[in-house]
Image: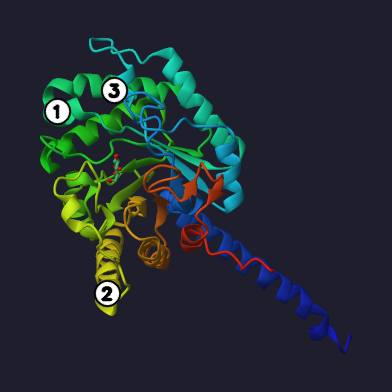
């Protein structure tokens, strides 16, 4: 008889129990991930920046930004994990069937996508500024579908670090109801070649938070991320913006970060989080930012408040934008606007 028999078996039992528990934990993680792979994908998007005013201008350079290879290093080194690339595909495709996208434009978008991927940045490709579509959705629908058919085929073999965003800021005649139908058609088009691709979809009315409730995503598709844009209050973020009528009247509006102002941001994000929970979809704030005409202290305060709320709820985000009118980066000075960058990605103070 071995007096310490029980003691001998104990470690074995503990080990077995530990293995079972570990297996259970792995199963749970796998089950959760399998339940909604989009949640994991949003964690990869995490902290992003829009490469705005470049490929969504009528022609690259027309709005002062031509993308350069070193921008990806600058963005990656600053701590961002993703970029969103606004693209005006409609300006580079035939007007008539088969609506072919110009190969040289595809090559240019490829340069940007590959540049970002090669630095380990996740990439969102969107369809931006299709103005004719917003005037006449029915007439333009075959062309829009053909564009997505080509984009989806072109990037089908790219890694899953590439995300598709079906349409930036539906507006005009692309009402919520029209967009709902169009969105489902685009999704079906994309899924023919990209079964596993993460697809981002926002509501109508300029991806407005208040219109999320009208967005109905198909239950069976778990690889979808919902998005909204956040520019509230417009009187602050868009003061002096030439494309917003009457915005000169907002000149000098500050965002002091009063309790009421902070509460307004918090309530908006709580509302978004409630939608996300009810619909079991992760959220991505694909655009937010304050135009350079506002004072920099206010911009920094507002930006930090928005980032804090987004991250509190686990939303991914992308600042609007890198180096134009809202720019966090000053191309001329070849430097980040430090306070703004810190508001986006808090970094330890530099030791002097
Ligand atoms: C538009 C930009 C604009 C920004 C802020 C974007 O969706 O495409 O042209 O600067 O929103 O208004």
337 versus 91 height, above or below: below
Other-residue count near label 1 (Cα within 10 Å), few / some / many at <14 / 14–19 / ≥20: many
Q: Quarter-wise, where is residue 334 in the image?
A: top right
The residue depicted at 44 percent of the width and 51 percent of the height is: 42
User: Mark 2 and mark 3 in contact (Cβ < 8 Å)?
Assistant: no
116 versus 276 height, above or below: above
Residue bearing mark 1: 137
Earlier residue among tags 3 and 2: 3
User: Where residue 115 sits: x, y (%)?
Assistant: 57, 32
Residue 202 in sight here: yes
User: Where residue 66 sits: x, y (%)?
Assistant: 46, 30
Q: Nearer the viewer, residue 218 or 18?
A: 218
Secondary structure under badge 2?
helix
Q: Nearer the viewer, residue 7 or 86?
A: 86
Ligand 1 quadrant assignment: top left
Q: On the picture, is 277 further left or further right than 45?
A: left
Residue bearing mark 2: 263
User: Where residue 249 sits: x, y (%)?
Assistant: 16, 55
Picture disc at residue 73:
none
């Amino acid at each position: 008889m071995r007096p310490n028999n029980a003691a001998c078996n104990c470690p074995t039992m503990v080990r077995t129990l530990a293995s079972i528990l570990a297996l259970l934990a792995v199963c749970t993680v796998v089950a959760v991930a399998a339940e909604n792979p989009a949640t994991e994908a949003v964690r990869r998007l995490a902290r992003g920046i829009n490469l705005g005013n470049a490929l969504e201008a009528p022609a690259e350079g027309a709005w002062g930004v031509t993308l350069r290879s070193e921008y990806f290093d600058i963005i990656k080194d600053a701590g961002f994990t993703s970029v969103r690339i606004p693209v005006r595909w409609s300006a580079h495709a035939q007007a008539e069937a088969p609506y072919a996208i110009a190969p040289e434009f595809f090559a240019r978008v490829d340069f940007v996508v590959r540049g970002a991927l090669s630095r380990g940045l996740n990439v969102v490709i969107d369809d931006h500024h299709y103005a004719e579509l917003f005037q006449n959705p029915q007439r333009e629908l075959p062309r829009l579908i053909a564009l997505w058919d080509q984009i989806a085929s072109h990037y089908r073999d790219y890694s899953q670090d590439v995300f598709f965003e079906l349409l930036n800021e539906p507006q005009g005649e692309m009402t919520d109801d029209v967009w709902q139908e169009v969105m489902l058609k685009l999704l079906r088009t994309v899924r023919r070649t990209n079964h596993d691709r993460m697809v981002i979809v926002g509501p109508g009315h300029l991806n407005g938070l208040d219109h999320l409730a009208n967005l109905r995503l198909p239950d069976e598709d778990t690889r979808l991320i919902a998005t909204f844009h956040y520019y509230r209050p417009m009187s602050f973020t868009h003061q002096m913006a030439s494309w917003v009528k009457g915005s000169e009247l907002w000149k000098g509006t500050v965002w002091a970060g009063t309790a009421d102002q902070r509460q307004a941001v918090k309530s908006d994000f709580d509302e978004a989080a409630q939608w996300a929970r009810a619909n079991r979809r992760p959220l991505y704030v694909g655009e937010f930012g304050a135009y350079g005409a506002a004072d920099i202290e206010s911009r920094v305060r507002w930006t930090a408040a928005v980032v804090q709320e987004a991250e509190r709820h686990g939303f991914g985000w992308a600042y609007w934008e890198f180096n134009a009118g809202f720019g966090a980066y000053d191309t001329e000075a070849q430097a980040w606007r430090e306070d703004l960058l810190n508001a986006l990605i808090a970094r330890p103070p530099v030791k002097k």
